[in-house]
Image (cartoon, rainbow, N blue to C red):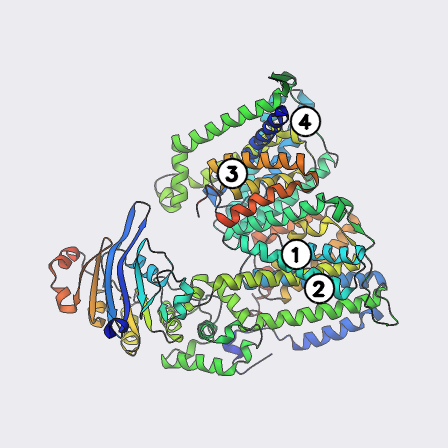
Amino acid sequence: MASYAMSALIITNLSRNFGGLQAVSNVSFTVEAGERRLMIGPNGAGKTTLFNILSGALAVSSGSVVLFGRDITRLPAYARARMGLARTFQITNLFPRLTVLENLLLALLAAEEEAHSPYRPVRANYSLIHRANRLLDEWDLGAIAGKGAKEIAYGQQRQIDLVLALAARPKVLLLDEPTAGLSAAEVVRVVGMIRSLPRNITILMIEHDMDVAFELADRVSVLHQGHLIAEGGVEAIRNHPQVREIYLGLDDE
Amino acid sequence: MMNFWLIQTLNGISFGMLLFLLAAGLSLIYGLMKVLNLTHGSFYLLGGYVGLAVLHLSGSFVLAALVGSFAIAAIGAIMERFFLRRLHLQELPQALLTFGFLFIFSDLATVIWGTNPQTIPKPTILAGALQLGGFFYPYYRLFIIVLGLIIAAVLWWLQDGTRLGAMMRASVDNEEVARALGINVSLLFTLVFGFGAFLAAFGGVMGGPIVGVYPGADFDVMLLGFVVVIIGGLGSLKGALIGGLAVGLLDNFGKVFFPELALFTIFAPMVVILALRPAGLFGRE
Amino acid sequence: MSTPYSKQLGLRPRLGPIAVVATVALLALPYVLSTYHLGLVVQMMIFALFAMSLDLLLGYAGMPSLGHAAYFGISAYTTGLLALRLSLNVWLALPAGLVLAGLTALLFGLLALRTRGSYFLMITLALSQVVWGIAFGWRSLTGGDDGLPDVPRPALGLHLPWSLADSTPFYYFTLVLVALALSLLVGIVASPFGYALRGIRESETRMIALGYNVWRYKLAAFVLAAVFAGLPGSLYAYYNRFVSPDYLHVARSAEVLLMVILGGAGTLIGPAVGAVLIVLLENVISAYTDRWLLLLGIIYVMVSLFAPSGLIGLLREFRPWRATP
C-alpha cells in the first residue's frame, strides 16, 4: 500500500508501565510525512514517556513503532538517530564545557563516516568548521560560535538545542517543549525557527503553551493519563468537549 | 568426610557474617548518602587495633568491642561532619576524599601499631569448642554466626519498622522534601555514617580472633566488602547478607582448595554477576 | 597550533615554543645530569605517559577509574616474564605486554561499562585489586611478594655499540618510545574520536541522540587507555629490572589518579606536570621518611576539598584557557 509506506511514524498499541503504574496505555496514531503534529495534555499525561519510547531512551512494554516503513521498536536509540530521527530535550541538553561551534561540530561529525577515524585533527577540518559556521549563520547565531555553551543566554541555549537536532538533516524531529522557560520574545524567535523548517522534515512536538501549539499544528493529539483521548485538526480539538473539560481551569499562561 | 564439609561450611558462614557487617555499613552509607565509602576498610582495621589495645589495658573483650566500635564510630562521624559534608552531592570528590583517608589511616596504623600481624585473643567464655556430632567446633565462630543473625534482624527492624528507617527512605527519595518535612537530614547523614563505621569497627574487633589484625587488612577486607556488594547489590541489606554468606563460603573454600589462586573463586562469581545482573542480585539502579 | 578558527574552538595555551625548548632540553639532559638524576627523569617520563593514559579515560571520556594500575602492572609482568623466563627480545616482550593489557581491559570494560558513577568506580577498583591479589598469591608464576628480580634490560637485537643496560642509552630509548606514544595520544585527542569522547563526557544522552554508539566509544577509550598505560608499565619493568605486586596495588592507582587530578584532567599536559611533581615529591620525601602514603592521603583530601580542577584549574583563574589539542 503506497500511502502506508509514506507515513513518517506509525505508532501501534504502544504501552509502557512502570511496576504498577501505567504511564502509556494502548496509544496508536499515525503521523504523515511533512506533518506538524502537536501533542498536548496535562502534566503526567505520558507525553515525555511517549517521546522517550519513540527516541529509544525507554523500552516499550508492548506495541510497535514504525519509522518510514521500518520497524524500530527494538532498535537502540543511537541507531534510530542515524536513521533520521532527531530530538530535543525538555531540559536543555548541550555540551556545557565545549564552545557552541564545537557542539555543532559533534552534531555534524555524527553523520560523517570520519567520526570513526582516530586521526585528522578536527581543528584542521576547515570544510567542516565552515559548514558549522554557515549553519549557525542561517539562524543568526553566528556571533556566539566561540562562546562556551553554558555561558550563553538560556534562550540561545534552547535555540542551539534545536540547531543541533537539525544539523544531521533529520527526517523526523521530536521537539520536547521547545519554548519551555523562555521569555515572550524568545518564544516568538523559536516559533519562527520551527515554522520556517522545510516540509521534508516531519515534526512531532510536545507543547504546553496552547497558543503556540494551535499556531504551529496541522493536527493535534491529546493525551490524558496515558491514553490518547482525542485527535484532529486545530478547530476540532479546540471545541472537543472532553479536551475542554480537562483544561477547564488550567488556562495556560 | 562429612565433617570436613560441615566444618568448612561453618567457617565460611562465620566469615560471611563478618563480611555482612562490613557490607551492611557500606550499603547503608551508600543507600542514604550516595557516598562510596572507600575508608570502610580502615574502619574495620582501626576497630581491630583499638579493640586490641583496650583488651590489653582492661582484659575485657566486651569493653574492647564496645570502645573499639564507638571510638571508630566517632571518627567516622567527625569525618562526615567536617569533611564529607563540604562535598555534598559531588560523587567523585567524595569518593576521592574517602580514598585519601584510606591511605592516611593505613599509614597511621603502621606508625602507631607497627607492622607485625597480630590477633585478638578470644574471650575466655568462648574459648572452647562445642561437640557437634562427630567433631568439635569453636564456640567463638558459632557465636559470630548467631550474633550476625541477630544484628541482621535488628538492622531489618530499624530499616523497615521504625521512624528512623522511614526518615532514611524519605531522605533518599527526595532530600529537599525531607528537609521541608522537618527531618534533620544533615544529622541523619552524620549518624548513619558513624553507624556504618560502627558496624565495620565492630566487625574488626569480632573478626580479630579469626582473621587477625595486620597492615593491609584494610585493603583485603575492603576488596571483599566490594565483592559482596557487587554480588549482592549496593544499597541492599538483603544483598549484604546473601552476598556476605556467598563470598564468605567462596573465599573459604577457595583458600582450602586453591590456596594460591583463592581470589579466582571470588573473581569468577563476580564476573558472572557483572555479566548477567550488573546491579547485583538485589541492587537497584 | 593556531588556525583561522582558533577562537571558536576555545583558547589554548601557546605550547609551540615550550615544546621546542622542552625537546632540546630533553635531548641534552644526559650531558648535564648525573646517572641518578637521569634515572629520575626516566621515571618522570614513564609516569607522565601513565598519567596521560588515565587522562584519556578520565579527563576526556569522563570515566574515572580507580584501578588503572592493573594495566600498568599486567603489561609489566608480561614483559618481565617473557624477557626473564623466555629470554624474548624487546620487540616481542613489549608488544606482548601491551596486547595483554588491552585484552584485560576489553574483558574488564565489557563487565564494568554496564554501570555508572560510584558503581563503576567500585568495580574498576575491585577488578584491579583482584589482579593484585592474583599477582601476590600466584607465587609460582609471579614470585608473589618477592616479585620478579633480574629482568634483563631490553635487548634490541641490533648490533649497536651501546647497551640499554647503561643509563644514557636507556634514557634515549625511553624518550623515543614515550615521545612516539605521546604523539599518538595527541593525535587521538585532536581527532573526531577524541572530540566524541569529550561529548560523551559532557552529555552521554545528547551523544546518543545525535547518533553515536556511545557504549562502543567508551569501550574503545577504556582499551586504548589500558594499552597506553601498558607501555610505561613495561618500560618501568625494564628500568627497575624488577616487577612486584606494588606495580598493581591500589596505591599505584591512587598515585596516578592524583597525578591526573592534581595537574588538571582533560588537558594531557596537566597530568604530565602532575606526574613530574609527584615523582619528584615522592623521591624527596622518601629520602627523609617512610610516610609517603600518609602524605598521598593528605594531598588527596586537600585536593578534593580545595582544588578539584587541579593546578590547571588554578591557572585558569588567570587565563581563560581550556585544553591542549
Q: Are marks 1 and 2 on the same chain?
A: yes
Q: Are marks 4 and 1 in contact (CB under 8 Å)?
A: no
Q: Residue B120 bears which disc, if any?
A: 4
* x, y percent for residue C28: 80, 73
**Residue matched to label 2:** C95
**Which mark is in front, 2 or 4?**
2
Q: Residue B193 bears which disc, if any?
A: 3
**Residue matched to label 1:** C71
**In the rendered image of this protein, does residue C253 appear above or below residue A253?**
above
Q: Are marks 2 and 3 in contact (CB under 8 Å)?
A: no
**In the rendered image of this protein, does residue B254 appear above or below residue A86?**
above
**Which mark is in front, 1 or 3?**
1
* x, y percent for residue A140: 37, 80
Q: Secondary structure at mark 3?
A: helix
Q: Of residues B169 and B53, which is closer to you in this image?
A: B169
Q: Chain of mark 1?
A: C
**Which mark is in front, 4 or 1?**
1
Q: Are marks 3 and 4 in contact (CB under 8 Å)?
A: no
Name the amino acid type tagged 2.
Pro
Name the amino acid type tagged 1.
Tyr
B29 to the left or right of A44: right
Name the amino acid type tagged 3.
Phe
**Which mark is in front, 3 or 4?**
4
Closer to the N terminus: mark 3 or mark 4?
Answer: 4
**In the rendered image of this protein, does residue B26 appear above or below residue C85?**
above
* x, y percent for residue A14: 28, 57
